Amino acid sequence: MADICDEIKRRRTFAIISHPDAGKTTLTEKLLLFGGAIHIAGAVKSNKIKKTATSDWMEIEKQRGISVATSVMGFNYGDYKINILDTPGHQDFAEDTYRTLTAVDSVIIVVDVAKGVEQQTRKLMEVCRMRRTPVIIFVNKLDREGRDPFDILDELEAELKIAVRPLSWPINIGAKFKGVYNIFEHSLDLFTPDKQKATERVEIDRIDDPRIDAAVGEADAAKLREDLELIEGVYPEFETGSYLAGEVAPVFFGSALNTFGVKELLDCFVRIAPSPRPVAAVERLVEPSEPAFSGFVFKIHANMDPNHRSCIAFVKVCSGRFERNAPYLHVRSGKTLRFAAPTAFMAQKKNIVDEAFPGDIVGIPDNGTFKIGDTVTSGELIHYKGLPSFSPELFMYIENADPMKAKQLDKGIQQLMDEGVAQLFVHQFNGRKIIGTVGQLQFEVIQYRLLHEYGAQCRWEPMSMHKACWVESDDAAVLDAFKKRKFQFMATDREGRDVFLADSAYVLTMAQNDFPKIRFHFSSEF
Ligand code: G4P
């Protein structure tokens, strides 16, 4: 029997995040190639939700269906077991990505060298910062014209609000791109634009090694030495501890499409990235090496086929050994369940597994038992803290368009919210239901799924709203006064917490000024 501590030590569970088009899919695919999980480039593409498909969300759902298989990509690399958790590229599904980040131990951020830090990356980094997730940054597309690497580093620090430390350094960029100097391993990797071929490496002893001049020419070698000197002067020595604490992000440069700089990234990643770490439950901190199994549901993937309304609940194993058919406690319902057909994802194949270890993700066929955030244990009553909900960006009233199907509509809304498709608020003034989302697409998805999975019809009614924020105060009387004054703008979320519906930025600022004793939160974790 495998020793649990050894199994934990060799696991690396992470997600790759980026703004759409920065190269996440390409990088994922190249990592899988190195891990031997796939053998040809292009195999991961089917999972990509193309930005051109925004108006055609049926197509998107089809692709999401396909993406069950690639939701988790497990493979072995040397002694390591790597689990890459896929995140949807489309920004309307950003909430899915946030939740996936609760199940990873670290993150690789891909940034396009020409575009720098883009909006989506900024938002995702906020979540990483909140959870102190260690991040490595891969600056991609060095084969194209782009920005000065020092400028990129400055921008990464300023925009992502994290200290950076380059661990590789490019020699030129675009048409003149010659390769990268690997600061982590002290070697020089020469660039050959070839999608399948690995890097050509020049072993060097010191930075003044004449082999550098021979390889890239004297002028570029001189510039490289100058840059490296500057780096050593400006950036503190890389130290794994500050990376693991989420304080410093090591930065690599390369070109995913040309498989350049990817192996260097991977080799450094497996060495420094954390293995599964202790996870905070409400009651206590749970060590992965504890013998008793525990885990939580971070994602529910619905089956789009209306004849099979089954889902897959994705459970992240947090502690102990997960075993097939063992009796486990579903903490929220208090029921004991046995999972006869848990699946795991190895080398792009979904197989039934007999056991899994901390850091692994198991897929459990489900018919509505699970909610996002549910905890499953060997028997202990603990509750893992899920990811907070963020204040949605778009809001609509949801109305019943078929009076005969009111029950179906209620059930459908409830289940879709359990799945985490969107957020539901109830207006305190008029009792109407409000759905909040991060993208327009979700409204279409909800309407379609209500009809096809629950036989219910809904109608959307636009409402003008700037933000919904959670409000609280240490002074109950103040909170009461606020709720009375703003009674037309108060709602409750699914847990019954008070939410203030501000219809403009001005109204929100005014409310904040008028009620200094009230705390306004833009995420539900406070
Ligand atoms: P995403 O998942 O982050 O959205 O990005 P994806 O990997 O799909 O990459 C977006 C585009 O950028 C793709 O081109 C991809 O080929 C290209 N790309 C990725 N890495 C590099 C790189 O290192 N250098 C260059 N020059 N391009 C890169 P596309 O035309 O949108 O897609 P495709 O037709 O090539 O599939």
Image: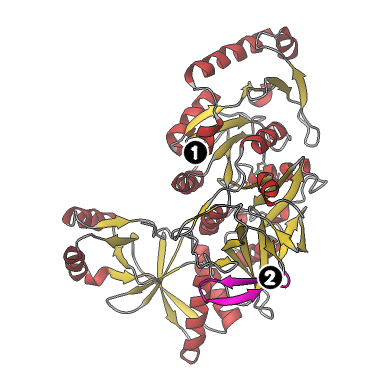
The residue beneath circle 1 is: 245
The image quadrant where one finds ligand 1 is top right
Above or below 111: residue 301? below
Element type at mark 1: loop
Give the residue furthest to the right: 39
Q: Is residue 253 visible?
A: yes
Above or below 101: residue 488? below
Q: Residue at x 49, y 92 (%)?
A: 404
Q: Please report contact status of discs 2 and 1: CB closer than 8 Å, yes or no.
A: no
Q: Which mark is residue 326?
A: 2
Residue 446: % across, % down:
53, 72
* 476 and 150: which is toward the camera: 476
Residue 507 sits in which quadrant? bottom left
* 344 and 141: which is toward the camera: 344
Q: Name the amino acid, label 1.
A: Ala
Above or below 233: residue 198? below
The answer to whether 21 appears left or right of 234 in the picture is right
Give the magenta range: 326-341
The answer to whether 410 appears left or right of 206 in the picture is left
Q: Residue at x 61, y 59 (%)?
A: 316
Using the numbered discs, state the Cα–Cα distance from disc 2 to disc 1 in whole angstroms.
Answer: 35 Å
Residue 523: % across, % down:
39, 57
